[in-house]
Amino acid sequence: MRVKRLEIVLTVGLLSLPVAGVLAGPTSATDADVAAVLASERAGWLLARTDTDVAALGITGLQQEEIGGSTDQPTEIGGGSYVQKSDDGRSSPALPMVMSAILPGLGEAYRGHKRGYLLMALDIAAWIGGVHYKNEGEQMRDDYIAYADEHWREDKLAAAYDNPPPGGYDDAELTYVELFGRNYFNVQDYRDLDLWVSKEDDAREYYENLGKWDQFVFGWDDFRRADDPRNSDPYGPGYVDWQIDDLRQQWTSPHRDIYREMRVESNDAFEKQDRFLYVNIFLRVFSVLQVAYLEGLMSGGGSDQELQLSGHPITIIAEPTGWHSSRFGAAVTF
């Protein structure tokens, strides 16, 4: 609106000069020449002044936009600066960001950045590693469950706590653990143990307890009491410490120790699977932020909304610094 007003003032000023001359009328040829020179000088001064005012107000960039000229130039308005960016015909940055959330690097590749292929390769490799260790952990879990079903007996555990059946125990294995668990755990029924849970109620905890807690050691088929007459150093020299009266050494069994090692190996495989999953998640977050940066939505780019922390502007950085490296971080301005 101000542009039009300035143009109107300029036009009116120029037209008023000859009209005034006509009304006043020259008194001589010399007076007419002087009047023409003065009019010319005043018109030139007005044009120069108008150009100065328009440039100071930033009208030049706006006029260029109206006539289709290039506007990718810094423009000063009100003491601040900005760059007018023309539409380059690209689609919304939302599409490559969604693509990167699905497959890291896909959004970068879609925009023509070759490092996107590296991110895609890393994500695929992480998925392959995660699936490998998942399958390995599940196979090891099946193995230790089968091992426990073969070597741990619930009826033997019952013999260590419960009253013997009428006529006593026929199985010699049960005879030598009869009521022995009561010496360490004050219960009359193994189902009253604090940590007891049946396989039907919670299979995962059931198999964890068999190897983890001493109160279930009596159920292993190779468990022996230190005073069992069948003990003739059955576990090898030094395995049974006859001088220490607790469950940590003599009240154990080789099958229980093997079972615990099998569980540790299975759990380690699942932990490696989780690490690869964390890599997959990180790659997606990094790729989405990197696309946002490359699209000008971060670090002072095309967004009108500024991220702040307690009133201090935050700049998030996610940018490539070569083929094999990147910068990722945040800066707070105080």
Image: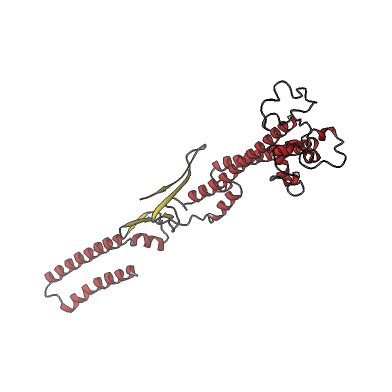
Could you tell whether 305 is left or right of 99 in the image?
left
The picture quadrant where one finds residue 131 is top right
Residue at image location 17% in from the left, 66% down from the top: 37
Is residue 131 something one can see in this rendering? yes
The picture quadrant where one finds residue 45 is bottom left
Residue at image location 47% in from the left, 57% down from the top: 87
Report the coloring of the rendering: secondary structure
Of all residues shown, which one is farthest toward the top? 237
> Looking at the picture, how far across and down is residue 197, in whole percent?
73, 46
> Looking at the picture, how far across and down is residue 3, in whole percent?
33, 67
Residues 132 and 317: in front is 132
Residues 87 and 48: in front is 87
Numbered-mark total = 0
Q: Quadrant of the N terminus?
A: bottom left
> Looking at the picture, how far across and down is residue 325, in whole percent?
50, 38
Residues 210 and 85: in front is 210
Residue at image location 58% in from the left, 53% down from the top: 98
> Looking at the picture, how far across and down is residue 306, in whole percent?
43, 56
Is residue 114 something one can see in this rendering? no
Residues 294 and 170: in front is 170
